[in-house]
Structure formats: C-alpha cells, structure tokens
Amino acid sequence: MANNKGLGRGIEALFADNDVEEGQEEVIDLSLAKLSPNPFQPRTNFDTQALKDLTFSIKKSGVFQPIIVRKKSDKEDSYEILAGERRFRASRMANKKTIPAIIRDASDEQMMEIAVLENLQREDLNPIEEAEAYNTLMTKLDITQAEVSKRLGKSRPYIANYLRLLGLPTEVKDMLTKNQLSMGQARTLLSVKDKQSLIKLAKRAYNETLTVRQLSKAIDELTTKPKRKRKPRRSTKQSPFLRAYEDELQDKFGTNVNIASSRSKKGSGKLEINYTSDDDLNRILQILDINLD
C-alpha cells in the first residue's frame, strides 16, 4: 500500500543548533575501518540487489554525497554513522578504503530521530521495522505517541496503527516482514483475538492469496455466531471490473469497500468505505490525503 510519508521535519532541522551555514562544512575522507553503523538504526534488512547496484556505481564513479558521522565518545578517532549507512555498506563491498564524510555533533536523541527520518524519507522500511522505529523513539526518549506524531509530522492514528502491528504473533510479524502479507491484511487480522486462529488465517491468506475482502469474510465466518443471519445480497450482478476495483480499494484502505451500480442511471452508483472507529476513520482520511486538523 502506498502511503504519503511526507515529514514535518527534515534531517537538517535536527542540526539547527549547530549554526553552520550550508556548504561551509568540511568534507574529509574517513577510513571505513573507523566507522560503525548508527546504533539506533531501525532497518534490519538491506535490499541485496539495491546494494549491488550501488556498489557497482561506487566502483565506477565513487561516492558523490558525503555521509554524516559523529565522533564516538568512548573511542578516540572512531565514528558512528548518522546518515548514509547504505553508502558505507556499498563502499565496503566495492573494496574502498575511505569514504567522504562530514563530522557533526549529535546527541543520542538526535541519532535516533535521524535514523528514523532517513529511512522514512526513503520509504523502504517494512511495516514492522517502521512500527519498531516509532516504539524505539517512545521508549528510549520517554515520549508519547502524540510527541512522536509532532516530531515526525504524521497523524496520531497513523502512528497508532503501525504500533498495533507489534501486538501480532511473531509468526505473523515475520510474514509481514517478508512481504507475505500486506499491511491491509495485517490490519484485518488484528480483529482476531485468538492467537492460533490468527496465525492460521494469516497462513491461509498467504497460501490462498486472499484479498482483504476475502480475508475479512473468512474472519466473519469464524467469529459470527451460527444463529446470526446475514442480510441477503441484492441479486443484481456486479461487473468483473467493479469487483476488481473493490479488491484494489480494499487492499489500499485495509477495510471493506463496496461499489454498487445504480439501477436507474447508467454510469452512476455508490462507493462505500467502512470504518470501525474514529481512529480508523482518521487513518482512511490520511490515506485520502484529507487533513481536517
């Protein structure tokens, strides 16, 4: 699912107190052996092919954009990477000895924010890594969801929906990390309270390539009491195009979506997007890029 990940603060905003004019910082070549990754890096998986492509580029043309580092407090002449770990990894794979870098002062708090911001701006964190990044900011900095929302320029419902994913069983989180489940499917599964049933449904969704609508129906069949009668559907046949559009929209919004054609006027109809709470409605509005704040 594509999300609008525009952030209220960029990485440069975190260095506002450094009082260094753009273009006035010294770029130096640092030994790769003296560098270590950001200890607060939220990303655990680096795309192998993307790293190979970057390695080839560095072998051919070098590193154009300097990485940003800070001096380690416990070791002399040793540095931690604030931003640019992919360039660091690719340079090692290219058998480079040094890399262009800018040295800046940064607190642990800034290191954490930078690690999250850099990855969110590149939009390549998987949902679990993104959720864990928000959780790390909250626990390490002792701040609330509202403060995380303000710092990163994202709505509270958006942050909350990602944090809810951390409550999924480990097996299901692994499936989400491996792209065996979509974000929409994972959110749908959160309504299942029994752990074993949830895991079983997740595996079924993957093995049978269920859409969000089909998965939601399977959950309804599991949780609905036998004596409850469902309202019969209208006999009007729906075109395969509208069914395909419904499936696409349900994957996008992670909830039930219905498209009904008008019986009286050709080319018109009704689009319904279901939501289960105020937070769920706010989440859908954000996907639609509607801000009522």
Image: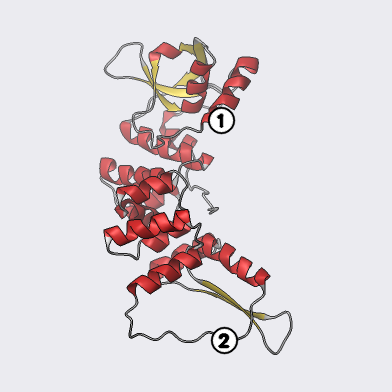
Percent x, y of residue 260 = 61, 80
Crowd tier of the residue under label 1, counting other residues whose Cα lies within 10 Å: few below 14, some 14–19, many 20 or above:
few
Q: CA distance from mark 2 to mark 1?
A: 49 Å
Percent x, y of residue 102 = 48, 20
Q: Is residue 100 visible?
A: no
Instruction: Looking at the picture, tell me which residue is in the foreground, 157 or 198.
Output: 198
Three-letter code for the amino acid on which mark 2 is drawn: Arg
Instruction: Looking at the picture, tell me which residue is in the foreground, 181 or 252.
Output: 181
Left/right of residue 257 with respect to residue 261 in the rendered view: left
Instruction: Looking at the picture, tell me which residue is in the foreground, 127 or 241.
Output: 241
Quick check: 36 above or below 202?
A: above
Three-letter code for the amino acid on which mark 1 is drawn: Gln
Label 1 residue SS: helix
Label 2 residue SS: loop
Q: Which mark is residue 49?
A: 1
Quick check: 62 above or below 173?
A: above
Q: Which tag is nearer the camera, tag 2 or tag 1?
A: 2
Instruction: Looking at the picture, tell me which residue is in the foreground, 57 or 232.
Output: 232
Left/right of residue 234 with respect to residue 184 in the rendered view: right
Asked if labels 1 and 2 touch by Cβ distance under 8 angstroms, the answer is no
Q: Earlier in the sequence, mark 2 or mark 1?
A: 1
Look at 51% across and 15% down and name the residue there: 99
Q: Quadrant of residue 226?
A: bottom left
Quick check: 264 above or below 258?
A: below
Look at 31% across and 42% down and name the residue there: 136
Quick check: 61 above or below 213?
A: above
Percent x, y of residue 198 = 33, 60
Q: Which mark is residue 234?
A: 2
